[in-house]
Image (cartoon, rainbow, N blue to C red):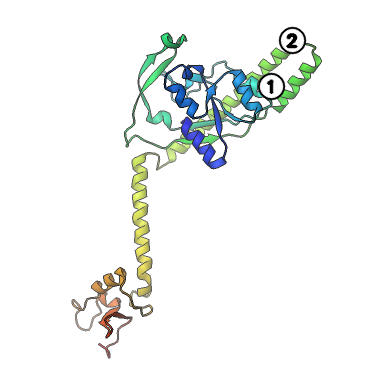
């Protein structure tokens, strides 16, 4: 969902997100080029600090490659952050605001067929690339995004700054406080993301247009209803509320009038009774070769 998120935020907010990617993404041929095309950089602390200090909006996946490349044993939408606090430490030290974000939909339509270990390729144990089944049109569904309330880090940074000022050199007290603050910030952010996932799953369950076939069906029904309404509005000037003929005399050769002309044919009516066709304008040939629409029914002129 990363391309959808980046494109959506840029289109709606004119804000470009620079993603931080696990270094494993930049080891794989072709994958590195794809990430760089989307503006992602290797997720090192120096890279992250550099982008933040230059005013970039940074997109972080705290779970790294293990979370992005889940295997078959992982639960859907499970956060695999573990004890990672790197993103929280940088956010505190740089005074950044964190906007918790999550999505639902991708993991429901992508089925993992097999896990291919890549330990031998990158030298990291327990990491694998999932082989995914391409969803059919019937399995294609909507992807939902959620953005939570911003989480400020200014209070953490202020307390950390006071600790730093009191010390002549970097000391254990500073590191201990930073670790404690980072863990609290990580847990707060994780709780917000998990809450967002639960909310989106409820929205997903209630969405009658979740699947692509449902959206196609409802769109077709909406188009049909719009055409019917347009035809009814076009016919309305030619009938009164009681269904009898009415309206203003018109002179036209439009397709609609030709259609009405065929409906108002002068056969099929029994004497003394008004047939449904008589509620439409009668058509007489005018001397100039055009059609005159005479609204109403006048026995003297018949």
In depth, the one of 10 and 244 nearer the eye is 10
The residue located at (74%, 20%) in the rendering is 160
Mark 1, residue position: 93
Q: Is residue 43 above or below residue 99?
A: above
Q: Position of residue 143 (x, y in %)?
A: 44, 35
- Residue 145's disc is none
For mark 1, give the secondary structure.
helix
Q: CA gap, disc 2 to disc 1?
A: 15 Å
Q: Crowdedness of circle 2 by 10 Å Cα count: few (<14), some, many (20+)?
A: few
Upstream in the sequence, badge 2 or badge 1? 1
The residue located at (35%, 69%) in the rendering is 235
Q: Are marks 2 and 1 in contact (CB under 8 Å)?
A: no
Q: How many marks?
A: 2
Q: Is residue 70 above or below residue 12?
A: above
- Residue 171's disc is 2
Residue 148 horizontal side relative to residue 161, left or right: left
In depth, the one of 263 and 169 nearer the eye is 169
Residue 33 horizontal side relative to residue 244, left or right: right
- Quarter placement of the C terminus: bottom left
Residue 83 horizontal side relative to residue 94, left or right: left
For mark 2, give the secondary structure.
loop
Name the quadrant containing residue 272: bottom left
Name the quadrant containing residue 156: top right
The residue located at (34%, 50%) in the rendering is 220
Q: Is residue 66 above or below residue 298?
A: above
Residue lying at the far bottom of the rendered structure: 300
Residue 185 visible, this orientation: no
The residue located at (49%, 36%) in the rendering is 7
Residue 102 visible, this orientation: yes
Q: Crowdedness of circle 1 by 10 Å Cα count: few (<14), some, many (20+)?
A: some
Q: Position of residue 67 (x, y in %)?
A: 48, 21
Q: Position of residue 166 (x, y in %)?
A: 81, 15
């Amino acid at each position: 969902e990363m391309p959808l998120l980046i494109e959506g935020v840029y289109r709606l907010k004119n804000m470009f997100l620079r993603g931080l990617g696990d270094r494993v993404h930049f080891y794989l041929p072709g994958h590195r080029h794809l990430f760089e095309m989307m503006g992602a950089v290797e997720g090192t602390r120096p890279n992250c600090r550099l982008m933040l200090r230059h005013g970039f909006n940074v997109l972080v996946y705290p779970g790294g490659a293990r979370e992005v490349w889940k295997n078959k044993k992982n639960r859907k939408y499970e956060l695999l952050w573990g004890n990672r606090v790197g993103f929280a430490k940088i956010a505190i030290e740089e005074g950044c605001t964190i906007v918790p974000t999550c999505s639902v939909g991708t993991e429901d339509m992508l089925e993992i067929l097999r896990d291919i270990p890549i330990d031998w390729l990158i030298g990291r144990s327990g990491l694998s690339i999932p082989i995914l089944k391409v969803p059919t049109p019937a399995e294609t569904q909507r992807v939902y995004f959620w953005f939570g309330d911003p989480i400020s880090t200014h209070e953490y940074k202020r307390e950390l700054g006071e600790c730093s000022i009191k010390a002549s050199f970097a000391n254990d007290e500073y590191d201990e406080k930073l670790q404690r603050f980072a863990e609290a910030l990580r847990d707060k952010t994780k709780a917000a993301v998990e809450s967002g996932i639960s909310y989106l799953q409820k929205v997903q369950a209630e969405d009658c247009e979740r699947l692509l076939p449902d959206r196609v069906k409802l769109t077709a029904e909406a188009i049909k209803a719009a055409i019917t309404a347009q035809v009814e509005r076009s016919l309305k000037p030619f009938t009164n509320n009681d269904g009898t003929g009415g309206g203003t005399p018109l002179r036209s050769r439009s397709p609609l009038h030709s259609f009405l002309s065929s409906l108002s044919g002068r056969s099929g009516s029994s004497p003394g009774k008004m047939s449904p066709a008589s509620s439409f304008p009668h058509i007489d040939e005018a001397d100039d070769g055009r059609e005159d629409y005479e609204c109403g029914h006048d026995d003297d002129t018949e």
